[in-house]
Image (tube, rainbow, N blue to C red):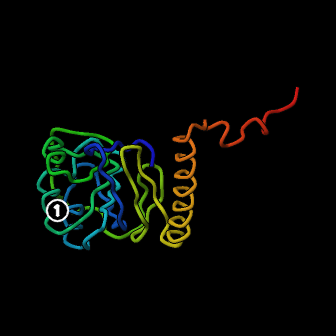
């Protein structure tokens, strides 16, 4: 997801199923209603079309913590960021703004949205940390999780070889890929 910045404390991770929300810039009604529909562990993903007026803040984050919502991703703006960080509530957004709009009730919950240049459906998996976010389609989640475990195992083996004195280049035998001149 491009353009979305982690608004999280160091070491914070975000993993959960998406509950999608489409709304207009500054209209925080549907994002707040989504909290009531969310299940514990869900990630609320909000398409504001990149708008600069906040649709999320401290009170919505507090409501999510009580409900067990895993985090929020906003292709738009968040406010009260200092308090959201104090709450350690995982938040990714395009903008930070000092002001919110008004609840108008435009938009919808649960439909296909676009967030950070990615199509997102309710039920897709959202995975994020300080390096950024990815969307994993629900149909591909098991395969992607298995691939991630394979990569982790391989990297753990390489880490151990480096600790024993090897270099990354020698372990991966990079010289065999060099072109002969």
Q: Position of residue 27 (x, y in %)?
A: 22, 54
Give the quadrant of the C terminus: top right
Residue closer to the observer: 17 or 96: 17
Q: Position of residue 34 (x, y in %)?
A: 24, 67
Q: Label 1's element?
A: helix
Residue closer to the observer: 153 or 56: 153
Neighbour class for label 1 at 10 Å: few (<14), some, many (≥20)? some
What is the residue that sits farthest to the top in this orientation? 181
77 sits to left or right of 174? left
Q: Quadrant of residue 126?
A: bottom left
15 sits to left or right of 54? right
Above or below residue 6? Residue 123 is: below
For label 1, the residue is: 65
Above or below residue 98? Residue 56 is: below
What is the residue that sits farthest to the right in this orientation? 181
**Residue drawn at (53%, 64%), measured in percent from left and top?**
144
**Residue drawn at (18%, 43%), measured in percent from left and top?**
81
Q: Position of residue 166 (x, y in %)?
A: 60, 38
**Residue drawn at (25%, 72%), measured in percent from left and top?**
40
84 sits to left or right of 181? left
């Amino acid at each position: 997801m491009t353009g979305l910045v982690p608004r999280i404390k160091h070491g914070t991770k975000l993993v959960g199923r998406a509950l999608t929300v489409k709304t207009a810039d500054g209209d925080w009604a549907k994002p707040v209603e989504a909290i009531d529909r969310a299940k514990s562990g869900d990630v609320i993903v909000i398409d504001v079309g990149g708008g600069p007026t906040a649709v999320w803040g401290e009170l919505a984050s507090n409501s999510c913590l009580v409900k067990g919502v895993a985090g929020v991703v906003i292709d738009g703006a968040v406010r009260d960021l200092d308090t959201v960080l104090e709450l350690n509530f995982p938040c990714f957004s395009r903008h930070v703004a000092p002001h919110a709009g008004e609840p108008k009730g435009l938009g919808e919950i649960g439909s296909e949205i676009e967030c950070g240049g990615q199509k997102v459906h309710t039920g897709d998996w959202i995975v994020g940390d300080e390096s950024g976010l990815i969307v994993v389609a629900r149909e591909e989640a098991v395969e992607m999780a298995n691939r991630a475990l394979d990569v982790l195992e391989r990297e753990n083996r390489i880490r151990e070889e480096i600790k024993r004195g090897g270099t990354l280049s020698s372990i991966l035998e990079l010289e065999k890929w060099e072109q002969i001149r």
